[in-house]
Amino acid sequence: MTKSSKHKEILFVADMVRGQLPGAGGAENNDDVLLMHLAGQEDLHVSFEHCSQLTQETLDKADFVIVGNFVSLSDSMKASIQKKPFLIYEHDHKYLRTRDPSPFKDFVAPRNQIINEEFYQNASAVVVLSEVCREVIQKNLRIDEVHSIGTSLWSDEQLDFLGSLSENEKINETAIIDSSNSIKGRAEAIKHCATSGIEYTLIQTKAREEFWQELSLYKRLVFMPQVLETFSRLCAEAKMVGCKLVTKPRLLGFASESSWTLSGKDLVEETRARVHKALQLFDALVREEKPEVNTGDGEITVILNAYRRPDILEEQIEAIRNQSVKVKDIWVWINRSEATFSEEWLAELGVKYFQSNFNWKFYGRFAAAMLADTEFVAMFDDDTIPGKEWLSNCVQTMNETPGILGGVGCILPGERYTGHHRVGWSNPNEETTEVDLVGHAWFFKSEWLKYLWMEKPYTWENGEDIQFSYTAQKYGGIKTYVAPHPKDKPELYSSLKGMEYGVDEVATSRARNHDVFYAQRDACVRNAIKNGWKIVKER
């Protein structure tokens, strides 16, 4: 590529590049796709250097540095890189001495096992391959700028070829990868087959296309990883060519993604979309721009909660449909109530709905949300009418500060709910504000819902907002924030009529219920703190 004054100099450093070893690993194949993509950008000039050969002279020429695997990178070069804008493209847990978090409870290592902490903390961004690895690195390093791309990287041509193999006739039964690398679990896979009486064939990881072709002829692959695989390119390729997996999902980053449920051409096309989105993220990061979260049509499911305010539901739905960010679906969860929500009327509203003959109170809608197949879920209390830019506000905030977002946040005074400080539409905040919990309106990644159900709630009668923020922090390292509610921009607000609709006679928190309502919430807070919740005041 001919250089000009307009080029930004991008230096990619890694231990190895594809082609240096037979059967290059996942990291090198990932890096190869990224390098080819960046090299094709007219405003970028991309060069590669081995970590062990990096010099200060080479580094000085770079405007931005991408660091891949860096085991052979000297401490002095790490220090020099930190003086420049750089990102770490994380492949195998190089923040741990063991490079494997799986032996530790909840994947959280003792502090004496953490290495390279300052290097990660000073990076402009850390990019990881899967949601579980984002959670693990955040819990171990306590850093915020971690982006999960939810995939390994393949070129369009590679994905086309994998898709073409998906319908091959399966003429062989069971394959095991014949790898001498102990972490790939060949011995454990053989033992599993022997114990289960399964006949198997050991296959070699030869040239990629030849290997994929051979793998596509098998009905199943037995793969028993011995460490937490940051994604597992092998398993994704096996599923793309129509091969079933016998494996350990807990040790696969791939299994933490919604694409894990797909196979064949469906997985190929989902992966293609994720790869394209990932490359757009890298484009933004190397240009030092804020990456955009493209919600597009079909990225958000909205869930409304209907109980005793049928007169407000139509207004809510209209407000959702008038959002500047369009949504895929609007669902309505209807608890058993004296109010009437007729099927004919709901059909006219054009929504999907759950009509229950039992009052599941606050948790029912969160159970329904587990069915959402969109990246994001937006949820609203039945007294909440959002401004037309609320969802756009959430998307932008999620882009800059990933976490559970809400319309009203509470900063707790200690081991009780009573006496909390409120932030949001009722007490406007100019900037994104970290809080302990949020309510009235939520916006979060659908993948995070699993955390809510990892512990039985202290009570089913109250405190779903407390439980969600508590368990998301405990199990996923996810913080909770209130998106900005600037005083002069009501269109960004989560609720425009909270002081009108939220204080009527059917409100759960109405004055005559205060003794019971707040006593329950105080107890929920105490239970969460007792079991590991770290509130803002204590942090």
Image (cartoon, rainbow, N blue to C red):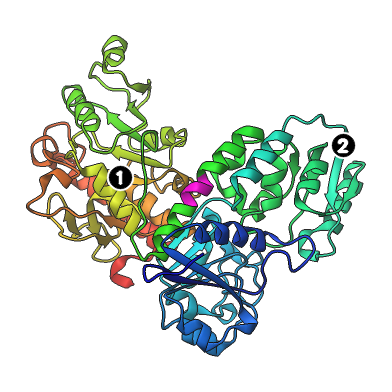
Label located before the other in sequence (2 or 1): 2
Residue lying furthest top in this view?
A: 344
Picture mark count:
2
Residue 429 location (% of width, % of height): 15, 58
Q: Name the residue under label 1.
A: 442
Q: Which residue shows up at 33% across the image and 65% down it?
A: 535
Disc on res. 124? none
Disc 1 crowd rating (10 Å Cα; few below 14, some 14-19, many 20+) is: many
Is residue 333 toward the left or the right of residue 389 in the image? right
Q: What element carries label 1?
A: strand
Q: Where is residue 488 in the image (x, y as percent from the top left)?
A: 7, 52
Which residue is at a point 59% across and 78% down the rendered structure image? 113
**In the image shown, does 293 or 318 lie closer to the viewer?**
293
The numbered disc on residue 173 is: 2
Q: Does the magenta stretch include residue 277?
A: yes
The residue nearer to you, when weighing 18 against 486, is 18
Q: Which secondary structure class fits the magenta region best?
A: helix
Q: What's the amino acid at mark 2?
A: Glu
Q: What stretch is highlighted in magenta?
A: 274-278
**Residue 168 percent across, percent down from the top left:** 78, 31
Q: Quadrant of the C terminus?
A: bottom left
Q: What element carries label 2?
A: strand
Residue at x 35%, y 52% (from the top left corner): 292
Magenta span includes 108: no
In the rendered view, does 234 fall on the left or right side of 220? left
Amino acid type, mark 1:
Trp
